């Protein structure tokens, strides 16, 4: 017997918890990166950053297949498969004896999290449209951001009581809980009569429509650049805040402040989007982000790449307010014309935006040289490129 559709609050919370597996898998690891690097004998100081980026590589491969399969067989079976793969990856990483095994586990975790990443978007699109969809995504982001706020503290607490391997056992336990909640409370949102048979003609037609919908592709690339900004920060935040600025065990607190900026902006966006619309807000957010980054680049350059911690936190907080406004809106804008092929569209948009972000995030992160100048330079250049793309998206 199918469960009944949960009420709005529970729906948003469940979607946020499913989405949070990715954030938790990233942010709880941050305080442990240096320790893992030492235990697994990495050769270079920037190499542990790959523990973060490899998860996104796995996610790209998963996103390619999850959407089309969910359009053919329904959302729930694919969600279960993804959660099981995530659990397997958590076990591999927990038992890793060298850095290659760790990266394999992280790849499998990313492969598994592709299901909640793509299917939560498809679930929302199955049930909501237009500004209502953007509102759900923004509320989801508001809850979802609580995980990054507390995840590094959870990771730090575990490190004080046990080894870094226990962090992965926590991932495993959470995946089991979320899978059970999803099974008990969420109905199948794609009925059999609306499913698309999985054949090459159907896939080619849907893929062609997604790739030739100009506005969707422009917003997808914009989302990729914006996500590249955030990935570069995630990759290097531990080195910058914990080591360069010598915050030590206070690192999770500062990370939480910046995560709150993203969450607060997303919560505010849920209110503003109903009045001003997705495009109006996104345009102004990316322009503000780019201008702010240009100003802070000058400050950073004059300070020899070592601006004061206070000025860095103010800059990053304001920059992440702009990112928080853009995250939900850009995805909603990209998906808006493609509701009738939501699964395949979500896979294409999700995989291509992530594929755009990964090399950019890795490039900026691996450029870390003991100063914040590479990070701020990357923020400015990606913001400038995203501004141009967004203008092109509307030029039709």
Image: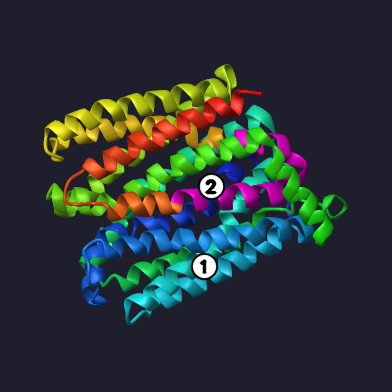
Within-10-Å neighbours for mark 2: few <14, some 14–19, many 20+: many
Q: Name the main secondary structure of what is drawn in magenta.
A: helix
Say which quadrant the C terminus sits in: top right
**219, above or below 86, in the image:** above
Give the structural element (helix, strand or loop) at label 2.
helix
Residue drawn where x is 72% and y is 61% of the image: 69
Report whether residue 1 is seen: no
- Left or right, residue 213 beside residue 145: right
- Left or right, residue 146 beside residue 185: left
Give the structural element (helix, strand or loop) at label 1.
helix
Tell me, for residue 50, which label it has, or none: none
Residue wearing tag 2: 353
How far from the left and from the top, in percent, is residue 317?
30, 33
Residue extending furthest bottom? 97
**338, above or below 299, in the image:** below
Residue drawn where x is 68% and y is 47% of the image: 345
How far from the left and from the top, in percent, is residue 337?
71, 35
Please report the bounds of the magenta region as a residue range: 332-357
Q: Nearer the viewer, residue 143 or 393?
A: 393
Q: Nearer the viewer, residue 388 or 38?
A: 388
- Left or right, residue 141 beside residue 37: right
Indicate which label's residue lies in the foreground, 1 or 2: 2
Residue drawn where x is 71% and y is 46% of the image: 342
Q: Nearer the viewer, residue 137 or 336?
A: 336
Residue 349 lies in the magenta stretch: yes
**393, above or below 374, in the image:** above
How far from the left and from the top, in percent, is residue 52?
37, 59
Q: Mark 1 vs mark 2: which is more N-terminal?
A: 1
Q: Nearer the viewer, residue 98 or 44?
A: 44
Tell me, for residue 86, which label it has, or none: 1
Residue 90 lies in the magenta stretch: no
Say which quadrant the N terminus sits in: bottom right
């Amino acid at each position: 017997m199918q469960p009944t559709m949960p009420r709005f609050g529970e729906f948003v919370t469940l979607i946020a918890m499913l989405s949070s597996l990715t954030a938790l898998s990233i942010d709880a690891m941050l305080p442990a990166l240096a320790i893992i690097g030492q235990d697994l004998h990495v050769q270079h100081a920037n190499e542990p950053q790959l523990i973060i980026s490899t998860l996104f590589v796995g996610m790209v491969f998963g996103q390619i297949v999850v959407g089309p399969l969910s359009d053919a067989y329904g959302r729930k079976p694919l969600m279960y498969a993804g959660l099981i793969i995530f659990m397997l990856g958590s076990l591999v990483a927990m038992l890793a004896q060298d850095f290659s095994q760790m990266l394999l586990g992280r790849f499998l975790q990313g492969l598994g999290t592709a299901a909640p990443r793509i299917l939560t978007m498809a679930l929302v699109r199955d049930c909501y449209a237009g500004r209502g969809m953007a509102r759900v995504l923004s509320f989801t982001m508001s809850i979802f951001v609580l995980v990054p706020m507390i995840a590094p503290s959870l990771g730090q607490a575990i490190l004080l009581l046990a080894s870094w391997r226990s962090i992965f056992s926590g991932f495993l336990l959470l995946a089991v809980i979320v899978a059970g909640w999803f099974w008990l409370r969420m109905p199948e949102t794609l009925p059999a009569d609306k499913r698309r048979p999985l054949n090459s003609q159907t896939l080619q037609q849907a893929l062609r429509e997604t790739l030739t919908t100009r506005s969707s592709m422009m917003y997808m690339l914009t989302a990729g650049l914006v996500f590249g900004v955030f990935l570069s920060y995630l990759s290097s935040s531990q080195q910058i805040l914990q080591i360069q600025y010598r915050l030590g065990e206070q690192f999770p607190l500062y990370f939480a402040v910046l995560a709150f900026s993203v969450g607060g902006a997303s919560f505010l966006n849920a209110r503003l989007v109903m009045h001003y619309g997705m495009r109006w807000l996104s345009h102004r957010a990316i322009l503000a982000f780019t201008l702010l980054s240009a100003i802070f680049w000058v400050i950073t350059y004059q300070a020899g790449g070592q601006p004061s911690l206070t000025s860095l936190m103010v800059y990053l907080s304001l920059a992440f307010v702009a990112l928080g406004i853009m995250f939900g809106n850009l995805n909603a804008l990209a998906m808006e014309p493609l509701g009738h092929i939501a699964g395949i569209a979500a896979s294409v948009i999700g995989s291509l935006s992530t594929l755009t972000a990964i090399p950019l995030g890795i490039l900026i992160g691996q450029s870390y040289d003991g100063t914040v100048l590479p990070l701020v330079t990357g923020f400015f250049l990606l913001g400038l490129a995203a501004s141009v793309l967004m203008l092109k998206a509307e030029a039709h």
